Image (cartoon, rainbow, N blue to C red):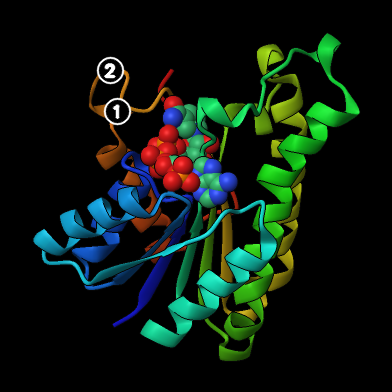
């Protein structure tokens, strides 16, 4: 069975992507910090007939991410798909600031969260994918990675940097069998109709995985 790893797995989009791939016979590995929450998500997936396991790690703790990915590989074998979509909790104090309040410190926190964590995770799985000539990496951000959203002055700097790297990876890996794509979500997940629901949005990830049709797929439901 192929394996998908979801980094930043929570009850919203992360769980929905797990269900979408799991019901198409993927094994699912969930990575985030809270072990109790992860246990609950694994139970829900198992009840739905999906083979799933969780590996606790904090994306700002690079050693823990590397260990979780190594443990995933040891348990399930090669990682076929890595989906990256951590979303900070309010309590994490990753303050959103407007452009006038941007500082080195509040940008550094966003870079640590969004960019450096993604680099650690992706670089841990990429060499194997390139060696196999096959693999998929899907990176989720918000709208401010693509277009200015003033209330997200510092978040947008980090998201734009991550987007830039992902799009570059897409180009250089296209002829190596590895598909890398960026999904900027302009939506408040779960806020309204079906187009805002994580189960709907998650189908896009399966579509991108199967078609490899573009380097970036903006999703707009605002
Ligand atoms: N929610 C929205 O309205 C919205 C809007 C635009 C874009 N997005 C994007 O959509 C994606 C998913 O959003 P979602 O709200 O549905 O989230 P979700 O998949 O329900 O959960 C995301 C998970 O990220 C984990 N996380 C947070 N900090 C982490 C860290 N330092 N290390 C490891 N994991 C961490 C959290 O679990 P732990 O606390 O257990 O670690 C959380 O449960 C994110 O990429 C987000 O930027 C969301």
Q: Crowding near pointer 2: few (<14 within 10 Å), some, many (20+)? A: few
Q: Quadrant of the C terminus?
A: top left
Say what secondary structure mark 2 lies in: loop
Is residue 96 visible to us here? yes
Q: Nearer the viewer, residue 84 or 104?
A: 104
Q: Most extreme residue toward the front, as rendered?
A: 36
Residue drawn at x 66%, y 67% as measured from the top left: 63
Tell which tag, 1 or 2, sits nearer the viewer: 2
**Mark 1 touches mark 2? (CB < 8 Å):** yes
Query: What x and y, as percent, mark residue 65?
Result: 59, 64
The residue singled out by tag 1 in the image is 195
Q: Real-space Cα distance between discs 1 and 2? A: 8 Å
Q: What is the x, y in percent for residue 129?
A: 58, 81
Name above or below for residue 67 compared with residue 41: below
Residue 79 in view: no
In the picture of the structure, the residue carrying the numbered disc 2 is: 192
Vertical comparison of 10 with 169: above or below: above
């Amino acid at each position: 069975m192929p394996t998908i790893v979801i980094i930043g797995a929570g009850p919203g989009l992360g769980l929905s992507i797990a269900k979408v791939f799991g019901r198409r016979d993927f094994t699912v590995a969930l990575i985030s910090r809270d072990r109790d929450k992860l246990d609950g998500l694994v139970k829900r997936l198992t009840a739905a007939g999906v083979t799933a396991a969780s590996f606790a790690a904090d994306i700002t703790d690079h050693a823990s991410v590397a260990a979780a990915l190594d443990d995933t590989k040891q348990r399930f074998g090669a990682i076929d798909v890595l989906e990256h979509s951590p979303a900070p909790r309010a309590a994490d104090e990753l303050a959103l600031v407007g452009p006038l309040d941007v500082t080195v410190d509040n940008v550094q926190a966003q870079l640590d969260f969004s960019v450096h964590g993604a680099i650690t995770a992706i670089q841990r799985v990429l060499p194997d994918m390139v060696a196999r000539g096959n693999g998929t990496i899907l990176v989720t951000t918000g709208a401010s990675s693509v277009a200015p959203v003033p209330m997200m002055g510092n978040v947008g700097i980090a998201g734009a940097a991550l987007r830039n790297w992902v799009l570059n990876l897409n180009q250089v890996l296209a002829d190596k069998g590895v598909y890398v794509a960026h999904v900027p979500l302009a939506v408040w997940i779960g806020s309204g109709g079906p187009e805002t629901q994580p189960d709907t949005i998650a189908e896009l990830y399966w579509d991108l995985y199967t078609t490899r049709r573009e380097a970036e797929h903006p999703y707009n439901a605002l």
